[in-house]
Image (cartoon, grey):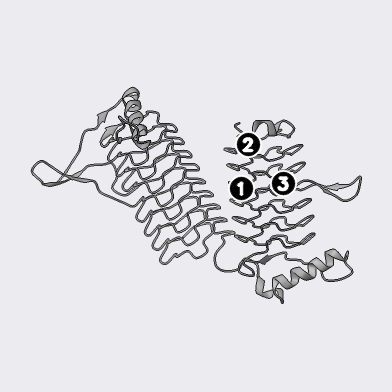
Amino acid sequence: MTQSRPLTRLDQAQLDNVVRRHEMFRNARMGGSRATLSFFDLSGLNLTGRDLAHADFVGSSLRGANLAGARLDCAAMFACDLRQANLENASLVKTDLRGACLRGAVLIGANMFESDLRDGTLAETDRAGNLKFVQVDTQPTEASGADLSGANLTNARLSGAMAIHTDFTDAVMRGCKLVRATMRGANFSGSNLEGADLSGADLRGACLRGAVLTGASMTMAETAGADMEDMLTDQPVGRPASSLGRPLDELARDHMAWVGSAGAEGTKLDLSGFDLRGSLASLDSMCLTMVKGIGTIFYGMNLTGIQLQAAQLEDSDFRTCKLKDADLRGVNLKRAKLNNADMSGVNLRPLMIDDKRAMRSDLEGAKLRYVNLNGACLRGVSFAGADLSFATLLGADMNKTDFRHAKLFGARVERDALRTANLEGAAGLKI
């Protein structure tokens, strides 16, 4: 038996009262009570930044609602209507979104770790104890046309979901379950699908350009017409590290001897075009001053405290690398991929050659989405035309830093740090 169930409409004042009591409940205060908002019409209402973790929204309509920055961890949102809702930077950790409709919703930067977006059907019992199915707009979870760019979908379950023309650009989808998901025309550009299960998924016409699919399963997946250019898989990109001839740590020691002797001993290291994944678990604290590595794959490596002064590393891939406290003075990282890298505390100030000459660090056109640059020295660095969307630059020294025509959407920056920076043509910066 299937029947429609009418929704009870709440206005903003009534909803605010329910949320206030829920937040009291969350803080173990007297008079608080859990928000039970099942089968309510909350469309168009404002829940920005509110704490609704563990709340019950089963079968409710939140169409066009503003939930930006809201905390919805472990909330029951089974069969919810979230069409055109704003969930930007919301926390949806382990949220039950089975059978929900996210068509056209904005989930940019949302944290959906281990959320459940599988298909689902809503049922309940009537007074006589008979089971009845409640009519909703869609049976499978639908996210068609939704914007999940940069969202954290690690270990999320989307098996059987429908996400046609959905934007997953730069999303973190490690271990995501996408078995038999319908994702025709979806955009996975730069997304991290490491260890994801895409068995039987419909990816016809999807864009997987620059996506990471190491350890992913794509058994019986349909990929006709999909764009797979620059995709990172378990197969080496370019020359494998095994073709270097000698272990990388030995070559690095020879390079350090070359640097220390001003070229009299050892050999300069040229890593251009090599895929170094698996060659070493770590290159941390190594001295690779003036190393050449154009188009080199460093993806996921531990480079903590590495010395790369005056290194030529344009077009290289440093995504998810640990570069904390690295010395990058005078480095050339033009057009490099540094999305989600930890660059906290790095030194990128100009490298002094003598009393009158200095070599500035160049990251022109680099991709630094979601990069961590907290406490970094960015004095005099060129980020012209770079993409620093959703980067964190708290406590960074940005004296004379060049951000001309850079993208800074969602970036976290301190107002005072920008006083001496060049922001000509920079887009999207909000203090």
Q: Which residue is mark 2?
A: 413
Residue at the far top in the pictured view: 13
Q: Is residue 248 visible?
A: yes
Residue type pointed to by label 2: Val
Left or right of 98 on screen, residue 146: right
Pinpoint residue 284: horizontal percent, then vertical percent: 68, 61
Q: Determine which residue is flagged by label 3.
A: 364
Quadrant for residue 36, please give it.
Answer: top left
Q: Residue at x 58, y 59 (%)?
A: 229
Disc number lying in front (3 or 2): 2
The mark closer to the camera, 1 or 3, is 1
Q: Quadrant of residue 134?
A: top left
Q: Nearer the viewer, residue 248 or 409?
A: 248
Amino acid type of the residue tagged 3 in the rendering: Glu
Using a 10 Å C-alpha cutoff, classify the residue at mark 3 as few (fewer than 14 neighbours), some (14 to 19) or many (20 or more).
many
Q: Residue at x 70, y 49 (%)?
A: 346
Q: Which mark is residue 371?
A: 1
Q: Are marks 3 and 2 in contact (CB under 8 Å)?
A: no
Name, please, the residue furthest toward the bottom.
Answer: 245
Whichever of callouts 1 and 2 sits on the residue coming sooner in the sequence is 1
Mark 1 residue type? Val
Q: Tell me residue 97's x, y (percent).
A: 34, 46
- The span from disc 1 to disc 2 (Cα, nearest Å) is 12 Å
